[in-house]
Image (spheres, rainbow, N blue to C red):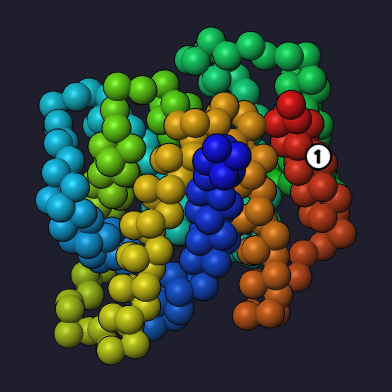
């Protein structure tokens, strides 16, 4: 019985590990000439193809008529696309820290959408995290300085992530499989919409090398398992508490970005990040 209680936690940690390292293969594909929007379209289409036998074998019934399904789909789709665009162009750890302001948004969303009790320490935690963000953004002569598109993508992705997690917990009438399918379809739909307004030429399948194909397959398999596991975890753990386990992603990203591409982060950003993380831990403390 005790083992079962740890399964949601393990699920969230596994998802955090996947998203803490997945930036690297996405960046490799970008360096090879495949932009993030296009790689997301190809990879999530492949992920969906991998999932179809799973739905057939397990005989999962999926209803596509629900407004809740499509709302979750579009929000999750934007969250994934903006996250990928952020980590491809931005400093990985900085992107992660900005993304993990999501627990601040989760606190307020969980209060109004889920009617979860909001202790005073949650508001204190939000204040600490926001001060940390201001420290990161501060530049001489500018109170708030977002210096690149990746910063904006990271912030907006964090908002989307908060909405996705709260929505996942709210819609208990939807199965884990339905929620996972909504996310995969959402990325494909949002990517297709972005591509429709993109002036670049879409890479053809013969553009990819064998290594590119292996990378995409590896990402697709990782996303298939991590999506199911994360949906399992956030369905069983309170929205704010679940956010603390995702912080493991920052640890994975910091280590991987240092050893794989030699990225470093300034003292100011580390201090701001420390306050953001402290706020998240305080909010999630039971």
Instruction: Report the front residue among 164 and 267.
Output: 164
Farthest residue, direction bottom: 210
Farthest residue, direction front: 1
Location of the N terminus (image quadrant): top right
Question: Does 3 appear above or below 222?
Answer: above
Q: Is residue 127 visible?
A: yes
Q: Position of residue 68 (x, y in %)?
A: 28, 24
For label 1, the SS is: helix
Location of the C terminus (image quadrant): top right
User: Residue at 49% across / 15% down in the picture?
Assistant: 114
Q: Which residue is mark 1?
A: 278
Q: Position of residue 124 (x, y in %)?
A: 80, 22
The answer to which quarter of the image holds residue 206 is bottom left
User: Residue at 55% across / 20% down in the picture?
Assistant: 110
Q: Position of residue 216 (x, y in %)?
A: 33, 73
Question: Does 215 appear above or below 164?
Answer: below
Question: Does 214 appear above or below 136?
Answer: below
Q: Position of residue 198 (x, y in %)?
A: 27, 59
Instruction: Report the front residue among 137 and 73.
Output: 73
**Left or right: 54 as drawn, with respect to 172:** left
Q: Is residue 195 visible?
A: no
User: Residue at 36% across / 22% down in the picture?
Assistant: 172
Q: How many marks?
A: 1
Mark 1: give few (<14), some (14-19) or many (20+) Cα within 10 Å.
some
User: Residue at 76% across / 41% down in the picture?
Assistant: 276
Instruction: Report the front residue among 211 and 245.
Output: 245
The answer to which quarter of the image holds residue 264 is bottom right
């Amino acid at each position: 019985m005790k083992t079962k209680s740890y399964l949601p936690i393990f699920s969230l940690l596994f998802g955090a590990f996947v998203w803490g390292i997945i930036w690297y293969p996405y960046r490799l594909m970008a360096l090879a000439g495949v932009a993030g929007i296009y790689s997301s379209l190809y990879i999530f289409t492949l992920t969906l193809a991998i999932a179809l036998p799973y739905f057939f074998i397990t005989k999962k019934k999926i209803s596509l008529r629900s407004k809740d399904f499509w709302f979750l789909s579009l929000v999750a789709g934007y969250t994934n696309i903006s996250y990928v665009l952020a980590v491809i162009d931005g400093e990985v750890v900085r992107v992660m820290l900005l993304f993990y302001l999501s627990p601040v948004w989760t606190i307020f969303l969980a209060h109004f959408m889920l009617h979860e009790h909001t202790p005073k320490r949650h508001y204190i935690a939000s204040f600490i995290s926001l001060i940390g963000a201001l420290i990161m953004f501060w530049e001489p002569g500018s109170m708030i300085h977002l210096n690149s598109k990746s910063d904006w993508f990271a912030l907006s992705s964090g908002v989307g992530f908060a909405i996705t997690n709260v929505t996942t917990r709210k819609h208990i009438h939807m199965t884990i499989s339905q929620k996972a399918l909504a996310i995969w379809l959402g990325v494909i739909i949002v990517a297709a919409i972005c591509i429709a307004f993109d002036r670049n030429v879409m890479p053809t399948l013969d553009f990819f090398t064998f290594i590119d194909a292996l990378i995409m397959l590896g990402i697709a398999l990782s996303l298939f398992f991590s999506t199911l596991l994360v949906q399992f975890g956030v369905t069983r753990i309170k929205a704010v508490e679940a956010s603390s386990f995702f912080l493991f992603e920052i640890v994975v990203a910091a280590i991987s970005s240092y050893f794989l591409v030699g990225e470093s982060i300034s003292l100011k950003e580390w201090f701001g990040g420390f306050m953001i993380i402290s706020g998240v831990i305080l909010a999630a403390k039971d």
